[in-house]
Amino acid sequence: MNDVMGIINLSESEEQIKDLTLGRSLGALHIFGRYRIIDFQLSNMVNSGLSNVAIFTYGKSHSIMLHVGSGKHWGLDRKRDGLYIFYPEVNSEDNIRRLGDLENYRNHLDYLQNSTQKYVLLSRSYMLCNIDYKDVVQHHRNSGSDVTIVYKTIEKSYDRFPNCDTLSLDDQNRVIGIGKNLGKEERYNVSMEMYVMKRERLIKIIESAIQRGDARFLKEAIFQRLPELKVSAYRFNGYLSCIQTINNYFETNMELLNTQLCEELFNKHGPIYTKVMDAPSTYYSEDSYVSNSLVANGCIIEGKVENSIIHRDVRIKKGAVVRNSILLPYVTVSEATNLNYVILDKHATITPRKMLFGDQSNPFVIKKNMVL
């Protein structure tokens, strides 16, 4: 895979998860106790042998930059190639949405032109999976296609992939049409927004779309060229979740308490790496009780925790009860507090004797730094 480079495109829709992305990009959102969402695509690429990886950011880049740093935790702190982070040349999120991601690709076209790899693999961060890209690239080579799109066949699950692109395929697995998941089909092929093509092909698509002015986003440029390009599809059969909404974020965290699903996501084609944080072991008092929960290091647990995800450096005080909830780093839950189906963002504080209840389909969100 020395002849393949990777790009993680963070121009992702955050409208339905904005309460958790007010001060960070979606890729920087904490998940599963000690990870960030972007860790999965970075790890997939590294585990597949890629050594030239770029992250294209779109505003709110500070958290991503602090998290990935030089890329050393993924083995990407290299003298040759390694990890690159590119920023948009406009600083208004409204302008970024208006101009689309093609403008960012054009502004950093020299990165593509100066890279030496023959192929490029593009992905988003919000499609969570553990995938072997070596198999995807080999499929692309064997098919003789101009572009290969990774997809998964989904049945009766609109809420997990709302408004995602869907692919219509012929009997040769060639993409012949594009649609949107509107919840009307019981079975559909959801695009995982992962594309493989030759680097020179990508450059031509970008330049052509900019010149013609017929697309704002790279995927639009690809889809509009279906009649003139051979676009094939690669079917993925493993675990997949799309983190586009508060509900999807909550459900994905909760279902990973299932050890079988957890093993598939974190180890199937290689481990998921993240930034290493030095923290002491979690302290559990004699009065504490923890059941079916994931608790990260550095916490102080003096209350009761059930079916929950507890991130680093969380304090749950005596008499507090936390059920079916997600607590991000540096959260404090005070005495005699009762939480059920709640998401507490980073540095949130719940004062004594509060009762906060959401439900499984609509968890209650406390924003970053709030005191309640």
Image: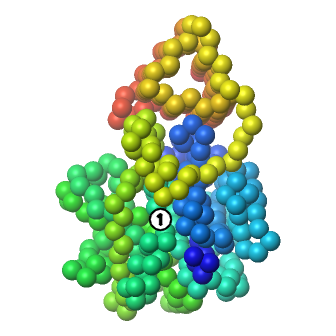
Residue drawn at the location 52% of the way across and 31% of the way down: 294
Q: Is residue 327 above or below residue 128?
A: above
Rendering coords of residue 338 (x, y %): 49, 15
Quadrant holding the C terminus: top right
- For image coordinates 29% across by 65% down, the residue present is 189
Name the element at disc 1: loop
Toward the right, the furthest residue is 79
Residue 169 placed where, x, y %? 26, 76
Colour mode? rainbow
Query: Residue 77: in sight, yes or no?
Result: yes
Q: Position of residue 359 (x, y in %)?
A: 37, 28
Q: Is residue 108 left or right of residue 362?
A: right
51, above or below 20, in the image: below
Residue appearing at x 59%, y 60% in the figure: 42
Compare residues 149 and 131 and report the one nearer the observer: 131
Quarter that holds the N terminus: bottom right
Residue at the (58%, 58%) spot, across then down: 43
Q: Is residue 90 visible?
A: no
In the rendered view, tell whether residue 372 sits above or below residue 42. Answer: above
Please state which of residues 18 and 35 is positioned toward the viewer in this rendering.
35
Label 1: how many Cα within 10 Å (few below 14, some 14–19, many 20+): some
Q: Give amino acid for label 1.
A: Asp
Give above or below for 262 relative to 363. Answer: below
User: Which residue in the protein does label 1 denote?
Assistant: 132
